[in-house]
């Protein structure tokens, strides 16, 4: 309990340090950035510490963190005092007038943080080697805590720095170190903190959409209520798979329905309990795998797409980059909304023609401070979860362009030019501000590939996004049919639909034509077809037959394509056709416009993966769906909360019957989405029957006491330097790598396959594996010692995983060794410094 209060107190300090800056930065939003001050302060403090420790000016210590926090407060106060009197009422006046907002945000944050800390305390299987990547995450946290400078050393590849977007682990380490918590507690409380910051971040976006800056009265509670609805949609509501689980457990639908809906592993592993509760176990995992990809023969693919959503991620307790980035994703959405609102403010000085190379002068009135703040906030996404950077950079540039085109009397060509200059400028600046990260970063990404297999089924897509699609359709079509000049709007929507539908089809036809017509294309397809796995997928040995099968698969199931292309087309029309104006009217129109933009981008992310995917080591679109759907959920959830407010705010505009039908449909779908969090939370917490404990490492300590004793001994006796250890390497999702993960000390090799994902190759792992095998199995003492010195090993671990490792190696026919004798050599060759049960730690003598 004390640590929960300590963390709450620390994040309050961090938020207060950045509050004056947030108040100035978000000066075009009704909430003035108050709900976003905490993530902004955490970002800026962590950035200053990281940059200082990367350049050698700061150390990654408590002292370095305090300096970074003081610098954040200093910058914040300087920005605030520099502009006093220019941007509305003072901060103290704002806090006094908007006390309802302040109280709501703080209660929401405290309740969310405390409730999720309780859930994490009761949840069994906190940090385990399988069921997520928690070993990797705790390894990164501990390695960051053990690194005095940045980048942190790689805990699973000694001599190398982490090659991963690790900024979220720097933030986690900042609060863990300040609070004095052990890493296992810091791991769990940071999960609760991210949940709370996501709740308040979603609240901020929807609150600012609903509240019209010049018309909102301090006593208006609608923005507060719908802000809370936005929090519910983004962070709490689940997809519809939870309802399907309950119905399947009850046995109320025929087998034909379950075969038709085809949720992966539901029929195979689900159980009919006769109640609406699916039973025990990890049944709730299936909600993150509701799509099933099939090959052109109709057979299931070996790897199904990942379709996580925020509540599932929090429930799992996976402190992975896509989760750690959530508050800052919402910060980026608020920045985009801030920019579109800026275009509508009356009396704003118009940007004058400026050199093409000057993005601040060309797009932001020459305000370099504003440009730098946007570059810092958006650029952070590249360091937090790299795929998010281009997504939210695109949203921000589109928001700027859409707002300017609608609010200013300026030709479209000029607006497009400003958008390009702003986009390129933010891209370059966002990369330069985080340059030390990119210098040492390598990736598994290998370009863009066309997706040529059958499309996603509409039914499974609606299981994932059903409530949001329902609201999007009603909101977009209602705006189309109730606006001025309805006939012209319908014509524009029809034309836009033709364009949206035609573009991917034309691109697909061009790609297929190039493959068929050109000799390199035919050779490429022939090479693919010679691969037995590819042949199995396409079901043909001829390129022509394979291409026909691809086209027929699209034509047989066009429903998702038609639905998404229509909604995207209508959203595009709304972005470009709002009324011109400013003040109160401009505030309302900009919210409508931005909501349509969120729908456009969210739907567009799920549309594009039907045609292309990003190539990685898996070779399928599994990760592309994962990354794009996740951000689509956030955008669609925020837009849907506003869409509900818009649909219900004026009875005369739509009519009672339409509003009632919309309200009933929305209520039913939201209730269906809430089934998952209600029943899954109880299941994940083990019925709240276990003894609560907030140390995520407790599972390992209890189930592997000998290994845990060795981990604690190493932490206590390794000294001031960071030692290199040798333990049995693992592939992925294995118990191997546990010593390095929980100490943060670099191992010669840990999860080798994960290293290949982070680095895009297996070269370094391939060099190390033979030497590790030799060290553990050879009978030549001098050879083993020379190899240990060659890899600068300080400690050798021999525990149950190493004994299994040696037994497996010695069982190979080509290897002549006896496991017991192979391990006994360490007793005389090295210095045994710790021993408990079947785990021994040996110190390697100097050369």
Image (cartoon, rainbow, N blue to C red):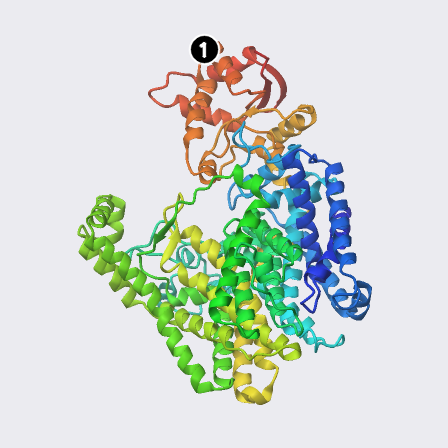
The percent position of residue 596, horizontal first and vertical second, equals 52, 71
Instruction: Give the SS element for disc 1.
Output: loop
What residue is drawn where x is 45% and y is 54%? 306
Q: Is residue 175 visible?
A: yes
Q: Which residue is mark 1?
A: 780
The percent position of residue 251, horizontal first and vertical second, equals 44, 66
- Residue 262 position by quadrant: bottom left
Q: Considering depth in this image, is 141 or 684 the residue closer to the camera?
A: 141
* Count of marks overlaid on the render: 1
Instruction: Please state if 506 lies on the left or on the right of 162 as rendered.
Output: left
Can you say whether 59 is above or below 600 in the image? above
- Residue 82 position by quadrant: bottom right
Can you say whether 656 is above or below 470 in the image? below
Instruction: Please state if 123 lies on the left or on the right of 179 as rendered.
Output: left
What residue is drawn where x is 41% and y is 28%? 766
What residue is drawn where x is 27% and y is 45%? 533
Q: Residues within 10 Å of mark 1 (few under 14, many from 20)?
A: few
The percent position of residue 724, horizontal first and vertical second, equals 58, 24
Q: Is residue 701 visible?
A: no
The C terminus lies in quadrant: top right
The percent position of residue 585, horizontal first and vertical second, equals 63, 79
What residue is drawn where x is 23% and y is 59%? 549
């Amino acid at each position: 309990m004390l640590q929960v209060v300590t963390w709450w107190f620390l994040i309050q300090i961090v938020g207060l340090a950045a509050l004056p800056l947030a108040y100035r930065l978000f000066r075009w939003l009704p909430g003035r950035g108050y709900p976003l001050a905490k993530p902004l302060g955490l970002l800026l403090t962590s950035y200053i510490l990281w940059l200082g420790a990367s350049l050698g000016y700061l150390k990654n210590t408590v002292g370095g963190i305090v300096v970074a926090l003081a610098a954040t407060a200093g910058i914040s106060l300087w920005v605030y005092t520099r502009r006093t009197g220019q941007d509305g009422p003072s901060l103290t006046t704002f806090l006094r007038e908007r006390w309802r907002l302040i109280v709501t945000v703080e209660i929401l944050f405290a309740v969310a943080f405390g409730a999720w800390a309780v859930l994490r305390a009761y949840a069994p299987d906190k940090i385990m080697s399988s069921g997520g990547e928690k070993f990797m995450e705790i390894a990164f946290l501990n390695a960051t805590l053990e690194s005095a400078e940045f980048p942190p050393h790689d805990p699973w590849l000694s001599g190398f720095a982490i090659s991963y977007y690790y900024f979220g682990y720097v933030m986690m380490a900042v609060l863990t170190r300040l609070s004095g918590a052990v890493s296992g507690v810091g791991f769990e409380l940071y999960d609760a903190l991210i949940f709370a910051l996501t709740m308040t971040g979603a609240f901020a976006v929807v609150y600012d959409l609903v509240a019209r800056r010049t018309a909102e009265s301090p006593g208006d509670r609608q923005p507060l209520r719908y802000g809370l609805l936005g929090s519910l949609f983004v962070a709490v509501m689940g997809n519809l798979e939870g309802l399907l689980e309950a119905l399947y457990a009850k046995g109320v639908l025929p087998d034909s329905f379950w075969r038709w809906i085809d949720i992966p592993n539901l029929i195979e592993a689900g159980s009919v309990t006769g109640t609406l509760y699916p039973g025990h176990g990890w049944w709730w995992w299936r909600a993150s795998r509701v799509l099933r990809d099939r090959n052109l023969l109709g057979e299931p693919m070996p790897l199904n797409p990942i379709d996580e959503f925020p509540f599932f991620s929090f429930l799992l307790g996976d402190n992975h980059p896509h989760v750690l980035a959530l508050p800052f994703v919402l910060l980026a959405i608020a920045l985009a909304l801030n920019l579109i609102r800026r275009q509508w403010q009356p009396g704003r000085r118009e940007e004058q023609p400026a050199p093409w190379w000057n993005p601040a002068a060309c797009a932001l009135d020459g305000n370099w401070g504003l440009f730098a703040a946007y570059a810092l906030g958006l650029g952070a996404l590249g360091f937090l979860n790299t795929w998010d950077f281009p997504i939210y950079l695109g949203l921000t540039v589109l928001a700027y362009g859409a707002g300017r085109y609608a609010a200013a009397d300026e030709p479209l060509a000029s607006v497009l030019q400003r958008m390009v200059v702003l986009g390129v400028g933010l891209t370059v600046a966002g990369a330069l501000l985080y340059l030390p990260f990119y210098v040492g970063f390598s990736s598994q990404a290998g370009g863009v590939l066309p997706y040529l297999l059958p499309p996603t089924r509409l039914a499974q897509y609606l299981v994932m996004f059903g409530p949001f699609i329902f609201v999007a359709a009603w909101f977009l079509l209602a705006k189309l049919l109730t606006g001025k000049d309805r006939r012209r709007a319908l014509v524009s929507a029809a034309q836009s639909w033709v364009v949206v539908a035609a573009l991917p089809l034309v691109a697909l036809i061009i790609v297929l034509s190039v493959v068929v017509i050109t000799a390199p294309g035919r050779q490429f397809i022939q090479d693919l077809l010679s691969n037995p796995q590819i042949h199995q997928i396409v079901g043909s040995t001829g390129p022509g037959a394979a291409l026909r099968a691809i086209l027929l698969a699209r034509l047989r199931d066009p429903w998702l394509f038609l639905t998404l292309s229509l909604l995207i087309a209508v959203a595009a029309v709304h972005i470009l056709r709002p009324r011109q104006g400013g003040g109160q009217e401009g505030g309302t129109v900009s919210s409508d416009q931005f909501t349509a933009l969120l729908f456009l981008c969210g739907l567009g992310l799920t549309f594009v993966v039907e045609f292309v995917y990003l190539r990685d080591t898996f070779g399928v679109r599994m990760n592309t769906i994962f990354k794009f759907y996740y951000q689509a959920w956030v955008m669609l959830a925020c837009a849907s909360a506003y869409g509900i407010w818009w649909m219900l705010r004026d009875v005369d505009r739509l009519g009672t019957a339409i509003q009632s039908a919309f309200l009933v449909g929305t209520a039913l779908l939201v209730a269906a989405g809430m089934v998952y969090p209600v029943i899954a939370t109880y299941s994940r917490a083990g019925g709240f029957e276990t003894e609560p404990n907030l140390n995520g490492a407790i599972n390992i300590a209890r189930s592997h006491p000998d290994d845990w004793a060795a981990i604690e001994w190493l932490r206590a006796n390794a000294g001031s330097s960071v030692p290199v250890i040798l333990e049995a390497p693992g592939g992925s999702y294995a118990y191997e790598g546990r010593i390095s993960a929980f100490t943060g000390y670099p191992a010669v090799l840990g999860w080798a396959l994960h290293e290949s994902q982070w680095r895009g190759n297996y070269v370094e792992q391939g060099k190390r594996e033979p030497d590790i095998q030799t060290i553990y199995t050879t009978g030549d003492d001098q050879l083993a010692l020379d190899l240990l010195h060659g890899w600068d090993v300080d400690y050798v671990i021999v525990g149950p995983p190493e004994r299994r490792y040696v037994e497996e190696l010695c069982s190979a026919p080509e290897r002549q060794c006896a496991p017991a004798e192979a391990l006994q050599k360490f007793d005389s060759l090295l210095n045994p410094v710790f021993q408990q049960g079947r785990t021994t730690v040996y110190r390697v003598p100097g050369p």
